[in-house]
Amino acid sequence: MFIDAMGLILAENRKLSLGELTQKRALAALPFAGRYRLIDFMLSNLVNSGISSVGVVTFNKYRSLMDHLGSGKAWDLSRKDKGLFILPPNVLSDSLSSGGDIGDMTAVLDLLRTSHWTHVILSGANNVFTTTFDDFYKKHVEAGADISILFNQDGPETARTTTVLKTDKGNWVKEILIGPESRAGAKYSLGVIVLRRQLLIELLSDSIARGENEFSMDQIMRRHTHLRILAYPFEGVCLKIHSVESYFSATMKVLDKSVRKSLFWSDLPVYTKVKDEAPSHYCCGCDVSNSMISDGCRVYGHVEDSMIFRAVTIGAKTSVKSCIIMQDSYISEGCELENVILDKNCFLRPGVKLVGQAAYPVVIGKGAVV
Amino acid sequence: MFIDAMGLILAENRKLSLGELTQKRALAALPFAGRYRLIDFMLSNLVNSGISSVGVVTFNKYRSLMDHLGSGKAWDLSRKDKGLFILPPNVLSDSLSSGGDIGDMTAVLDLLRTSHWTHVILSGANNVFTTTFDDFYKKHVEAGADISILFNQDGPETARTTTVLKTDKGNWVKEILIGPESRAGAKYSLGVIVLRRQLLIELLSDSIARGENEFSMDQIMRRHTHLRILAYPFEGVCLKIHSVESYFSATMKVLDKSVRKSLFWSDLPVYTKVKDEAPSHYCCGCDVSNSMISDGCRVYGHVEDSMIFRAVTIGAKTSVKSCIIMQDSYISEGCELENVILDKNCFLRPGVKLVGQAAYPVVIGKGAVV
Amino acid sequence: MARRDVIAMILAGGQGSRLGALTKHLAKPAVPFGGRYRIIDFTLSNCSNSGIGTVGVLTQYQPLVLNTYIGNGQPWDLDRNDGGAFILPPYQKSSRSDWYKGTANAIHQNAEFIDSYEPKNLLVLSGDHIYKMDYAKMLRAHMDKNADATIAVIEVPWEETSRFGIMEADADGRIVEFAEKPAKAKSNLASMGIYIFSWDVLKAALVADEADEKSTNDFGKDVIPRLLSEGANLQSYRFSGYWKDVGTVESLWQANMDILDCPDDLNLYDRSWRIYSRNPVKPAHYIAKGATLQNSCLTDGCIVEGDVDHSVLFHSVVVEAGAIVKDSVLMPGVVIEAGAYVKKAIIGSNAVISRGARIGYSSVGSSPYLSRICSDDITVVERGVRIREGAEVPGNCMVEYRDDIVGDNVIERRTQVR
Amino acid sequence: MARRDVIAMILAGGQGSRLGALTKHLAKPAVPFGGRYRIIDFTLSNCSNSGIGTVGVLTQYQPLVLNTYIGNGQPWDLDRNDGGAFILPPYQKSSRSDWYKGTANAIHQNAEFIDSYEPKNLLVLSGDHIYKMDYAKMLRAHMDKNADATIAVIEVPWEETSRFGIMEADADGRIVEFAEKPAKAKSNLASMGIYIFSWDVLKAALVADEADEKSTNDFGKDVIPRLLSEGANLQSYRFSGYWKDVGTVESLWQANMDILDCPDDLNLYDRSWRIYSRNPVKPAHYIAKGATLQNSCLTDGCIVEGDVDHSVLFHSVVVEAGAIVKDSVLMPGVVIEAGAYVKKAIIGSNAVISRGARIGYSSVGSSPYLSRICSDDITVVERGVRIREGAEVPGNCMVEYRDDIVGDNVIERRTQVR
């Protein structure tokens, strides 16, 4: 109900790469589900929980995030003294060198130290789900845990970067494993934790003192074995994105009615930047099936099992099947696309044919002219 | 009247250093006249001229500027598609290296290319004056000049970085001299120019093509001798800041009635960030003379010929004479200060004595405890 | 544009009774239009795109929706520190309290507000027109000609001149005669209800107009003729392009259908002159397998499983499998249940057309809901009603909820409208 | 705080006639206070600092200044996308149009607005109190006790109980009796006019209250007694700290003087609970050589050349050389000319006290401006008048401009107020 906490989102994750899709943008800035970016979901979850102060930690790809987040207005986080803080690297006064990771952590520490909230909800941005943290927070406070961590039992296909929690029957964490082989009935961390602000300051300062240059709560928690860590189950739909393949399959899952309902049609709005596009126009002769299409599009051709972002044109006699087409792309007449991810602002000349496989979708980089 | 132009402010100037005062902040972010920063004057001049789109070009000290400017709300430049653009260095995708100057210029070029204004008003931020550019702009358009440049005949004491314009009787510029020896009746550039956006794009692209890494309009104009450059006289009060000494003396000039009137009491407001400080409190036993004092101060002691920024405390039995005391500084009881510049957030213990000379004021850096 | 050059006042006070049930709960300018807009979005966006930063919206009838819709003005870039968007209802002064009388009286009652911005000129606009126009150009013309007032005019077909205020202008565009809805017009230049006044001139004219007991305090009927008779410099400003007054059911329906033709002079995809609006954040719309869509507009949050042809769907509309929607306007949250048939209708927000119901199925038929307000076989359904399963509503009906609908064979009950 | 927990409604409709000329042109909550604020800043800032993002301001009397002052709500961090600050004047519905009657009627007329935010609770506030209070704590108490309504109470001196609504509460804080301005009070806990209601409960009570023809539609007089008699769970919430109703000239003057004592429980320098305000951007104030200042508050843009003692100066006040100002409140833009003397006065915005004039020079004296509204030797000068050179105005005067001041020996003319 009354969450006395601020939010902190780690917008980048060096362990995860989505190839060309994250080469020039932070993972958190990855477009998703037609009109969102990944960070919209976590930001909305925090805001819908009544949190009014959120820091976004970036390393070096902060431009895409700054463009998207702006002053935080779209999430109602444009406030006078609190609101949204984008924490880009600390470029030191007279040199452009360094900055780097410890710089990131000191900026985070500065923000934490000048805040007055009792708790911090710390999270990545690569899991997509819609919820509030009311119960999670309440349970954390009531149980008297040092750290509480959200989990579910829906494991990702690949295990390399997965954090598995070993707990007792009361869900108290006994062990934290990263990418274990055996995963029967495993509890997978969703990378969302709540802890006292003061404790986070201590843990971070300790890491900095040890000369560590990476912000890994997993590592930190494994070191501090005296901490009482509680695992809290998340019951809803959660899409996990850690590779191009899982990004593609997560998108296809969004077309499913129950997933759409869980993500978008609860009482909790998912906020994102407003673009003021016109309505989408379905022209005579178009043919659309099992697809999501955003505002500002013009559809003349055939679209099936696809996710179409804003202001896309699908030309006549073109077939788009099982594709992700990002904002402002233009697909000319007579093209044939299947299992393709088209990044923003691409232009496909008439008659282009691109066919991938569901497990290996063809990825076309931003602004490409094909 | 209808100025079809955007603004571009160069927030840093590598030729000018104000020592500790500009070590960690851009020149444009230097606090001035109690509650302003230097850039407030040029931003207000642009906004008061009806300009709704302004780019601020920084090199590496953009943090102080970002904190001050925020979303541009205070200058009514928080707009959807236009408004305020802070152009920090382009840190490239996967490396923190380089960025540097050409990066800056490409960011500027991007902004210029996507704008739709016909003209650009380009300016530095180290001259303090209050005006609109209506007449300057009108004259530029009517005269059919390629570039128009604002000047006055009030030369700075030191000549090293001064740009002097040699003109014919019609004020057409025949020669541009930098730091000349002979200066009788010289026309000093105020570093404010107006030109077509397309021309600026051409000149900048040309510089980049030549591998130049500095944004010097003086140099550019000297190279392109075919350009018709018009000098336009500025008649009002203009304070020029290019050294600690000139910063100090400019501040003292603000205490003068006619200067105060010209800068602050015309019809044109000088906008700055609002801080919501309480009123200043003059306590029993205080004694203040010929000084400007901002909101949120508490004054118990003696203040004479000084400029006091926001939320400063002047302790009892303390004497502050000919000083600049920046925001949030605390001066304890029984101190004696003369010709001192105290940067933000300093703490002076009881009984501290600091005495400088008008030409060599004592400068105490930000956050110092003395 | 400098702040003091001009401020705008939008007349949004009319009850819009010719729109019947559509304006029962909201002012006409707040009526949804064109898939994701409300009518006033066009005027507000024109102001913002023209560089006008201070806009007063004069309203007194059902302003709640309009008030919360406009809010802080942010969607139209009108959340300014010095200025912005203001809703201006009538208020009690220390001596008297009046509702707005005519259009001119509404401006007169807000003279103090206008004065506080010290504008040189006042742009007076109507809140119920659909068009894109650069007022800055008109202001430039006004100033270049040193006019006391400038009136935007558009050529209308000669046969329609009797519906408009008609201007006769000399070769230089100066207005020499003005006739309100003339039986026999001397010109086909109609006033668009868009005026720029030099504020000093208008202020004096308003004082004189208020003193005149015979005046109806209307711009077209009283103030403009007064200025003309006094020899003021009244200029006409020619506009050509799409412009439509959407004051009737038929014109509102037609203007929505016009959107589907993507007219060049009302290009909603033009990013240099966007029409802004405030919208709830909904996901992209979803088109199911088996759905068909032809020549239609959709916005966020729609779910289409049935057949939609030549229609405008606002956000969060649901068209279930087997439902057919033709030539219609479905406002936000409308649900067309399986097997229902909707033709040439305007369905108000959150209304539900139950299974098998038929709306506008025929141009003839009898119904207690037949209405003189509706014409051309268009049917209107009030927001938030649920139409009974299998109910039949012919064209030209205005289906309105009344407190006593027991035994009604069209409306089942009221749904909740948010 | 989550959005639907609570929204706030500020009652700002009163004419404030006990403030005489000070509220002739503006609603009481808009009266300048404490050097850089207006009265309503305290309530608005409390809302914002308590995490309440949706605030309606109910006003009908001279709302212009309040309307432009509150604007988009940005200074109080109330420029929200979903919510924010709203001015809510009365309006015409399709069936009827009413001005607000009592405080409860004002809320009732805006039930639809409130409903549109679906709040669980409604915080009802007054717009003319000076205090700092965390409403979130009060809401927590309200919810913890599962109350239908929670009323903030403060201990007042027993001898003043007859001026207040007095609550009697049991040991757990539950209200067992309520007496409006009792002759003989059973308790010294006075209602502060700050209520949290469970919205469902209040909505039902308002419907019943409206149906009751004898009701005056007031919270204190009608709604609270009704709830109590129905056995609703009414809880008291104890507040201690600075709290002042500034409804009279004397209390307004006193509250301004209180500021000069920097009371701990109204600390304006506390950055964790700032009082926000909207102010024009003016330069730092300037103190000339030869000026003296003792125990006074100044804000931006003031120019002081004379002597100022124990006074509150708003922005852009000028005190010329040789002028003396004591125990006074000078609102924005006031000019005290050379040699003038001002004591124990509240001088309205932009008023000019000409050379040698004396305001409040004596507690006795005769003047056509003596007023029963003024007491304790306080003198009030209306905004925007110029006092004649050498004029003398004794204490307890209310110097108001009238249209016929020919031959008046106090007021010379009107100045321009911006």
Image: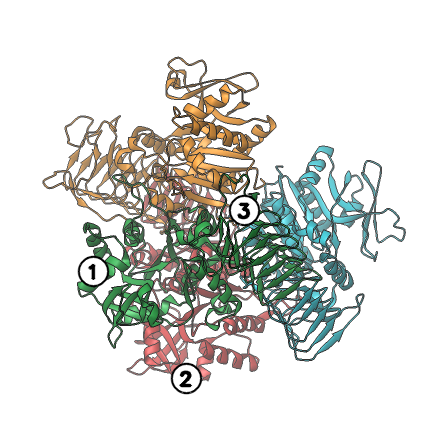
Chain colours: A red, B cyan, C orange, D green
Distance from label 2 to label 1 (Cα)? 54 Å
Q: Which mark is residue B335?
A: none
Q: Position of residue C58 (x, y in %)?
A: 41, 38
| Quadrant in the rendering for residue A265 | bottom left
Q: Position of residue C32 (x, y in %)?
A: 34, 40
- Residue pushed farthest left? C407
Q: Which mark is residue D226?
A: 1
Q: Position of residue D18 (x, y in %)?
A: 40, 54
Q: Give the label, 3 or 1, closer to the camera.
A: 3
Instruction: Determine whether label 3 and label 1 are within 8 Å by CB.
Output: no
Horizontal side of B135 relative to C190 (left or right) equals: right
Q: Give the label, 2 or 3, closer to the camera.
A: 3
Distance from label 2 to label 3 (Cα)? 67 Å
Location of mark 2 (residue): A227
Distance from label 3 to label 1 (Cα)? 46 Å
* 3 and 1 marks on the same chain: yes
Query: In terms of depth relative to the viewer, which is nearer, D278 or C130?
Result: D278
Q: Is residue C327 visible?
A: no
Q: Residues within 10 Å of mark 2 (few under 14, many from 20)?
A: few
Q: Residue at x 53, y 67 (%)?
A: D260
Q: Is residue C16 above or below residue B263?
A: above
Name which of mark 3 and mark 1 comes first in the sequence: 1
* 2 and 3 marks on the same chain: no
Q: Which mark is residue D384?
A: 3
Q: Is residue C44 above or below residue A124?
A: above
Q: Position of residue B237 (x, y in %)?
A: 74, 49
Q: Residues within 10 Å of mark 3 (few under 14, many from 20)?
A: many
